[in-house]
Image: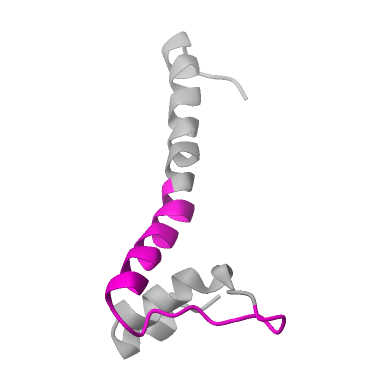
Amino acid sequence: MISRNLNDARRTPVIAAIPKVLMPAIVILPGLIILALQSQFTGFDLPRTPSGDVDYNMTLPVLLKNYTPAGCWALALRP
């Protein structure tokens, strides 16, 4: 890819770094939120795997189920 000028070439890595910085927030924050909610409220229990361990992959679906209205819930979980 060729940039139009040197300024655009220098700006490209900065623009590409923004999603990399936001990805930990998308992954870590929901886990921290559900841990705090589990200690204060009921209904935020995570499902268990067949082996009996907690299924942490279900963090976002549990948060979506508890915080979105019924009509929006189906749209949020649609693949």
Q: Residue at x 33, y 90 (%)?
A: 70
**Residue farthest to the top?**
6
Q: Quadrant of the C terminus?
A: bottom right
Residue 4 seen from this side: no
Q: Residue at x 48, y 54 (%)?
A: 27
Report if residue 29 lies within the magenta region.
yes
Q: Residue 50 at x, y = what percent?
A: 70, 84
Q: Residue 37 at x, y = what percent?
A: 32, 70
Report if residue 39 lies within the magenta region.
yes
Q: Is residue 63 left or right of residue 10?
A: left
- 52 or 6: nearer the eye? 52
Q: Is residue 15 above or below residue 35?
A: above
Q: Residue 29 at x, y = what percent?
A: 39, 55
**Residue farthest to the right?**
51
Q: Quadrant of the N terminus?
A: top right
Q: Is residue 76 above or below residue 28?
A: below
Q: Is residue 72 left or right of residue 59?
A: left
Q: Is residue 49 above or below residue 23?
A: below
Residue 9 seen from this side: yes
Q: Is residue 1 left or right of residue 30?
A: right
Q: Residue at x 28, y 85 (%)?
A: 69
Q: Residue at x 43, y 78 (%)?
A: 62
Magenta stretch, residue numbers: 25-52
Q: In the figure, residue 42 lies in which quadrant? A: bottom left
